[in-house]
């Protein structure tokens, strides 16, 4: 917007700023949600200073030292004064941390039942008395649990919660809470929009960059306990001795923070780096190679977590190259790791153009027959939906369909299809949607969460993985709000019942402030943001409409290539209608769901409207339950998305006096890009639909700004940091 | 080194640390040499606090505001207390800054003669009295000069100089002091080893990252007044409207810091983005296109500096594509820019495989006939040597050979051929060597410095350009010591007579401390470092022996491709001898130098030994002036290089208590890599020479660790941040 309209918000903003008090000092986002600024409410600060007057650490270990350092840093910052450390409890307000095994004082507190509930990784926070002194106890069964408890205590203070009468017992519901870094040897991060890989291989193992420790602290603060260091599009060199030495060095940095390292293993490694002539899982030499490789890995890294594998998917090598099954492939690796306690996370993201079936059905078809055929230390890793991390998909039908196999959830923390670094989209709502989804596998209440936490089918080996967007950018994630997705992923993996709103609330208070206006308005923005993206990109159940290479801008016209990668395959739009018929009359993907979902999805009257065009092909003129035609409803949803972004900008601007100027400006600039690009997505899509349906655009909706040819020719200059297209300015 | 030897330094280091006082707090290098830590000598601090008690700014402008902000930040930090600002001089110890035009108080001081000497960009620092008050005056003719003076004042304090009796008049000897950023649209930096491009095009012009201002401050602090934003391997899109808008935004950030922006212009732009059918400089439509383009640029950026051009070099388009000369090509652009005051920097880095002449002669052959044919606003930009930024080359014969043309110097700040990010190599000594070199163009004293500053031939348009290594890495340059090259480039461009040692001394004091041990030992390291690299890579005048693609490791065997890119072309090594005959019996490159250099270079007895094999082909058994054979001398020099690195490591380790742990560790880790890689360079070279000369290695020199085949097969995994090969560990 040129001219006055562009400058007016600045003038108003300056006036607002002039009227308010001093803004917080500029921040660059490096400290994430672990900023530990002095509590800015005087009464609360006084209370906390009374509650917390000293630290006593019962015992010594790397994890306890990490907890000690974090508490000194955090409490020192939050309370605005250094925290003394006493070797034994000697004053009121002591924070006493440790395990019963390491601390007689803690052992004497009678926390047996609570500690039993805390389990292997959990912790107990309690106010208590030790030798007559008022203490806050942070206790756990293992030192790593103490660290988690310490972070919980710090979070309570950061979010303004009272510390009197503490009675927290926490334990994670999921055992493997893993960040998958799709980092490559060359320093790029596939689908990463936050700079280069954090792992500077060339200077490992000799140089341990300080950033590795800050990364570990961030993960530990949200309960992440596993890191896959390398891309699933594997590079076998990661399994060779020079790289294992580097991996071991990283493992050493992470270990005190309760984090184990994993590696993505390339199935053809026995050939590529082993010099064997085959990688057939039934070949004795291959089996011996993996056993020896596992032994080698565990000599270097005694607590190595295991392998993540992408096999026979998008060109990656795998067991099917030798006419073996996924189970045989997974078991090959599992057997090599089992003596060492390692696990295999075997991805079910499989589909092939040669298979004529609807792409979203193929993984189910391939994996369900293998149920129960995997070793006990294998988890099948399943994306939240059956296509590929689209802004909205129904939950993956594999959830509930493999009762005899540990099935773990793969989420995408990096916003490959939701605006990458620039578009504000909080994904907690998407993840809550899938966790709360009822599969009906064992009747009502068979939620994805209960499958993922093992409770529905009685599995103890459980997991959630997130494809990370963490890189060398100063703010780690490419944008401030992208940090919220990392945060929410960890918290929701620890507790799938936490909920998107609660996670958002925690994040906002720790990342910005406890200012009520900030918390309320930013929570509203975050909770509305994902749906805004759905609306301006792919409303009403559309999916896979992005431009061909960069996945950043719109491309509903994309065609002419491999069908299961073409937008036209998924929108099925023509002169008469749009949408993919997945009912029995079509691909019958609905049949992969349990009743009553199967029937619910199969009828356009009962399918949730936000999945309408995922399951149905309808005429443009079909009248929907709201009374509007499908065409009008699409236009209405696109507009809702655009309007939501406009509202987010105004809401953010209203917070200018309450947010530090550096982070404020960066978010503001990206919201401006998002506004222009929401319009771009909408216009490009609408003008393409019009080229098919020849329908006019009814009032009050605007005509697209440009021609179809204009949008089709829009390129994206490559950018090693992130793909980017020039934004389209809205003409006034 | 495995085993005890590896741990011993750590043990000793810890003991040393335990004995000393507290180490300085960790730093990440972001603040470069502008750290402004409190003066740590109590007596000096007291004196400075007496000298400097307040700031008064005479006048107002963006540059004065920048100076004000820098002085408040710097003096506040150095003096350990906020500096009050008085609107007029009202107390002793006032720092009074401004120009006579803007400040009556400064006008009244009678600084006419000094200000005349200061000229357009210079400044005067003087103790004086204003209204009876003792003041420190920072005066200049223009506001940008005031900013330079402010940085000089801060530098004096940072380096512990006294402020009583100040009488400084400074003016740059060179008018264009330019950093050439070889940054690409996709965010990569060609020959950059410091992360991604600083310019985040996708969020410009709307978002001005705080880093842009810190970049401008760093440049201004060392007197850099021009920035070429984009790679000489040009991309015509930079000249299009969307990018000009972004460039204008950057120009706006830089302007208060006295920095103008330039662009590398792709000669074929009229075709690529203009839609013309030719780019012939004599075509009227082409001339009109460039005039219109210049008009468009200056409407957006009124103080745009001009164009940098690489034409008909390594595949870039240029006037020779139309059978026109470099002068005709340069004049085309010069005429378009002249009405706006812009300049053209036209690179003389030209050579072609099709031309049978010795590559190092070709630029001279092509440009000398064009002397005097360039417009007045064209500078011919000439690399320091006639090959390509090798660790050592003789000075470029074009210096002195084009008396009627402004000739500017192009240096490489980024260490493409000197170890990139990891090897410590201070280039100030290299640059002093070329600046002090006597061309004898007008008899003795015709130094390159006097050509570059215009004094030898009476030119007023003068320049020095540095190919930058600045990127998104937190420490800006990929390593702490690489920062020193940026620093020294700016200071030596401002004053070509400053000298490498003085620049190093300034940098060390500002970057680390004034601790005498630190200053002495680090100065020694820096002054020895470039020669160490020469010795272990390409001693005795060898050049262009690096591996083919990555330019990082050794490749003296490289052959089989385009001859002027092959190592064997430049080493001419065979069973009998080594070296390139550039005497009259050979390529006669010596003839391009003035007498007596021509004769001096032509004889192996008088040529400087460090250029021996640049100018001569000699038998391996030739006896040199030291009494050793050439083979022995080569081995001795390789070993000197390795020994110097070992000494640098020990020297650095001795400084552990005096350097903050984060920067200390990062340098230490890279020195370890450098030690291993110095051995790699030496061993690979020696084993290759032996494969030709069959000579044994005399005591006391060690045999190469591996076979020739091992070194030839060593690859470099690509890394977007920097190329890297696995380092070779020294076996004990």
Image: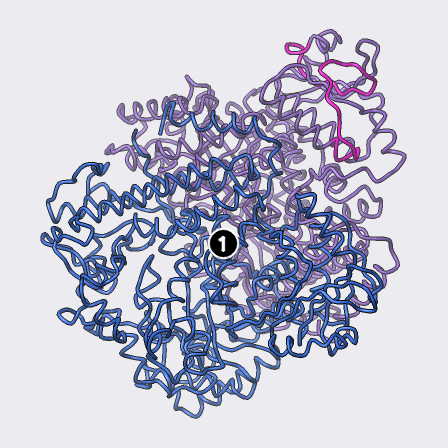
Chain colours: A blue, B purple
User: Is any atom of residue B554 visible in this view?
Assistant: no
Chain identifier of the residue bearing label 1 in the image? A
- At horizontal 85% and vertical 63% (from top left) the residue drawn is A90
Measuring from the top left, give residue A615's x and y in whole percent. Answer: 21, 64
Q: Quadrant of residue B130?
A: top right
Q: Quadrant of residue B237?
A: top left
Measuring from the top left, give residue B210's x and y in whole percent. Answer: 56, 38
Tell whether B341 sits left or right of A571. Answer: right
Tell whether A136 sits left or right of A497. Answer: right
- At horizontal 76% and vertical 39% (from top left) the residue drawn is B37
Q: Locate the C terminus of chain B by quadrant.
A: bottom right
Magenta stretch holds residue A465:
no
Q: Reply above or below: B124 against B634.
A: above
Q: Locate the N terminus of chain B by quadrant.
A: bottom right
SS class, disc 1:
helix
Give the residue number, with chain letter if any, for mark 1.
A504
Q: Quadrant of residue B138?
A: top right
Tell whether A38 sits left or right of B207. Answer: right
The mark total stands at 1
Magenta stretch holds residue B101:
yes
Q: Nearer the viewer, residue B248 or B596?
A: B248
Measuring from the top left, give residue A137's x and y in whole percent. Answer: 72, 67
Q: Reply above or below: B229 against B102.
A: below
Q: Nearer the viewer, residue A450 or B505?
A: A450
Tell whether A458 sits left or right of B270. Answer: right
User: Is any atom of residue B68 visible in this view?
Assistant: yes
Q: Nearer the viewer, residue A105 or B570?
A: A105
**What are the residue bounds of the magenta stretch?**
B75-103
Q: Reply above or below: A298 against A245.
A: below
Q: Residues within 10 Å of mark 1 (few under 14, many from 20)?
A: many
Measuring from the top left, give residue B524's x and y in whole percent. Answer: 77, 48
């Amino acid at each position: 917007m040129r001219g006055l309209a562009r400058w007016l918000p600045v003038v108003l903003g300056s006036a607002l700023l002039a009227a308010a008090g001093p803004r917080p000092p500029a921040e660059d986002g490096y400290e994430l949600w672990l900023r530990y600024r002095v509590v800015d409410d005087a009464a609360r600060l006084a209370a906390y200073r009374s509650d917390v007057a000293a630290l006593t650490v019962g015992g010594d270990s790397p994890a306890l030292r990490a907890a000690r350092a974090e508490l000194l840093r955090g409490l020192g910052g939050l309370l605005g004064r250094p925290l003394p450390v006493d070797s034994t409890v000697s004053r009121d307000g002591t924070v006493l941390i440790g395990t019963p095994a390491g601390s007689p004082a803690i052992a004497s507190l009678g926390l047996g039942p609570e500690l039993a509930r805390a389990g292997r990784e959990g912790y107990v926070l309690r106010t208590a008395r030790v030798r007559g002194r008022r203490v806050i106890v942070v206790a756990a069964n293992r030192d790593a649990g103490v660290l988690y408890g310490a972070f919980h205590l710090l979070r309570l203070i950061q979010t303004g919660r009272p510390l009197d009468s503490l009675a927290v017992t926490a334990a994670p519901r999921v055992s493997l809470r893993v960040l998958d870094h799709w980092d490559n040897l060359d320093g790029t991060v596939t689908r990463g929009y936050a700079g280069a890989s954090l792992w500077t291989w060339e200077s490992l193992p000799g140089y341990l960059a300080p950033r590795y420790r800050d990364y570990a602290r961030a993960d530990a603060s949200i309960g992440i306990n596993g890191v896959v260091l390398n891309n699933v599009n594997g590079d076998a060199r990661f399994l060779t001795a020079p790289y294992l030495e580097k991996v071991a060095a990283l493992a050493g940095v992470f270990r005190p923070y309760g984090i184990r390292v994993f590696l993505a293993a390339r199935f053809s490694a026995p050939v590529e780096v082993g010099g064997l002539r085959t990688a057939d899982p039934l070949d004795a030499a291959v089996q011996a190679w993996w056993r020896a490789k596992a032994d080698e890995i565990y000599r270097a890294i005694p607590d190595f977590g295991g392998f993540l594998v992408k096999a026979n998917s998008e060109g990656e090598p795998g067991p099917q190259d030798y006419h073996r099954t996924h189970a045989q492939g997974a078991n090959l690796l599992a057997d090599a790791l089992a003596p060492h306690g390692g696990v295999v996370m075997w991805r079910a993201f499989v589909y092939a153009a040669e298979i004529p079936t609807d792409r979203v059905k193929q993984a189910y078809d391939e994996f369900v027959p293998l149920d129960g055929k995997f070793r006990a230390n294998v988890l099948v890793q399943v994306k939240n939906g059956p296509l590929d991390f689209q802004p909205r998909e129904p939950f993956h039908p594999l959830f509930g369909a493999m009762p005899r196999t540990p099935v773990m959830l793969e989420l995408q923390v990096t916003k490959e299809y939701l605006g990458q670094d620039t578009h504000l989209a909080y994904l907690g709502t998407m993840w809550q949607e899938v966790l709360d989804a009822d599969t009906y596998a064992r009747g009502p209440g068979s939620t994805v969460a209960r499958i993922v936490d093992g409770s529905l089918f009685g599995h103890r080996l459980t997991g959630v993985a997130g494809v990370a967007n963490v890189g060398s950018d100063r703010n780690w994630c490419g944008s401030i709000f992208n940090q919220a997705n990392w945060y929410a992923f960890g918290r929701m993996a620890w507790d799938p019942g936490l909920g998107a709103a609660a996670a958002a609330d925690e994040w906002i208070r720790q990342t910005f402030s406890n200012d009520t206006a900030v918390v309320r308005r930013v929570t509203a923005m975050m909770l509305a943001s994902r749906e805004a993206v759905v609306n301006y990109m792919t409303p009403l159940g559309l999916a896979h409409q992005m431009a061909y290479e960069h996945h950043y801008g719109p491309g509903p016209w994309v065609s002419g290539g491999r069908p299961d990668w073409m937008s036209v395959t998924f929108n099925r739009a023509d002169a008469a209608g749009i949408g993919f018929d997945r009912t029995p009359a079509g691909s019958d993907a609905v049949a992969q769901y349990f009743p009553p979902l199967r029937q619910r999805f199969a009828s356009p009257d009962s399918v949730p409207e936000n999945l309408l065009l995922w399951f149905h092909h309808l005429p443009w003129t079909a009248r929907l339950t709201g009374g509007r035609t499908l065409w009008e409803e699409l236009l209405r949803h696109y507009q809702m998305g655009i309007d939501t972004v406009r509202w987010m900008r105004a809401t953010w601007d209203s917070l200018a006096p309450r947010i530090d100027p550096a982070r404020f400006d960066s978010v503001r600039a990206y919201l401006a890009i998002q506004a222009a690009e929401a319009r771009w997505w909408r216009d490009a899509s609408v003008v393409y639909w019009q080229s098919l349906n020849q329908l006019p655009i009814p009032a009050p909706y605007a005509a697209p700004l440009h021609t179809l040819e204009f949008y089709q020719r829009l390129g994206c200059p490559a950018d090693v940091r992130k793909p980017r297209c020039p934004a389209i300015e809205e003409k006034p």
